[in-house]
Image: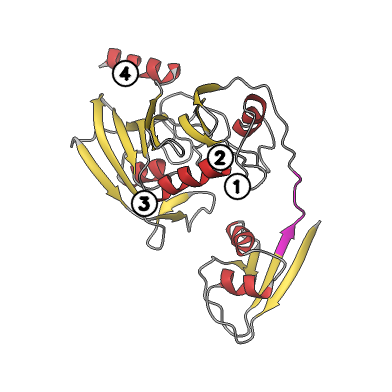
Amino acid sequence: MKKQLEVIINEEKGRVDKVLAQRLADYTRSQIQQWLKEDAVTLDGEAIRANYKVKSGDHFVIQIPEPEILTLEPENIPLTIVYQDSDLAVINKPQGMVVHPSAGHPNHTLVNALLYHLDDLSTINDVVRPGIVHRIDKDTSGLLMVAKNDHAHESLAKQLKDKTSLRKYVALVHGNISHEKGTITAPIGRSKVNRKMQAVIEDGKPAVTHFTVLERFDQFTLVELQLETGRTHQIRVHMQYIGFPLAGDPVYGPKKTLKGNGQFLHAKLLGFTHPTTGESMVFEAPLPALFEETLKKLRKND
């Protein structure tokens, strides 16, 4: 059963998410923004965006679904723990594993595995994301930092925000990139055509990706990418935007692509300053077996 709310604008002015948050005291602005993302807020039957500026007389209808109750259960899922101490852990996430539970993936996630293998996790995020400082996509493999307490979480999150942490990825992309290095500076936000996708849009959030060519093949290029920002699907969107979509990407890549378990994208290097000791720490994870096998086949064909 869905709960329906109706709000009629009087003299209020500004963004719809802000105005609705003021009018609906029982709900947070972030919750209202989530409804907007899910097209649950309509005006004259049309879904609207969070930056819509309200007008006097606007009549908004909000369809609020009954919340799905998610239970977090420790699960004995194999986990590669690259490093851990009393403050943090570094995990090498396998391709195909979802980071945290959601309505579509209530269990068998990295969080379920962390609850089984680690004694403590930070509590700063909501209840379904304990310890999660940042995430990578389900079909992206590689390194993630996990906080075991709130002090460590705040420190690691601040390093991400201040762009002082180091994150490098390796990706296999369609096409042959002619130059050795490049920087993609293009804002990313929810696609206006397909709201389940991200896209480069004029009013998106700033996003910067640096890339270096590692190896060229007949129809593909192996690249190293360094993130300066951390937008949703940033590498996948940026590489598609410049005409070199990731091989195997079921969302942003071409239908005719290399066989795999999703996009050929691996978070290979992670660096940060330890929250307690101040030590500079850098970790590296080798490419998954399928990624390496695919590269060997490309080299052989060339």
Q: Which residue: 44% across, 31% down?
A: 263
Badge 1 amino acid:
Asn
Q: Does 234 appear in magenta?
A: no
Q: What's under tag 2, amino acid-wise?
A: Ile
Which residue: 69% across, 66% down?
Answer: 62
Q: Circles 4 and 2: CB distance less than 8 Å?
A: no
- Mark 3–mark 4 Cα distance, whole angstroms, equals 31 Å
- Mark positioned earlier in the residue sequence (4 or 2): 2
On residue 298, which mark appears? 4
Residues tagged 1 and 2 counted as in contact (Cβ below 8 A): yes
Relative horizontal placement of residue 157, taking residue 48 as reference (left or right): left
Answer yes or no: is residue 43 visible: no
Quarter of the image for residue 224 reads: top left
Q: Which residue is mark 3?
A: 207
Counting residues from the start of the chain, the first of labels 2 and 3 encountered is 2
Q: For the residues carrying marks 3 and 4, which lies nearer the camera in this image?
A: 3
Q: Secondary structure at mark 4?
A: helix
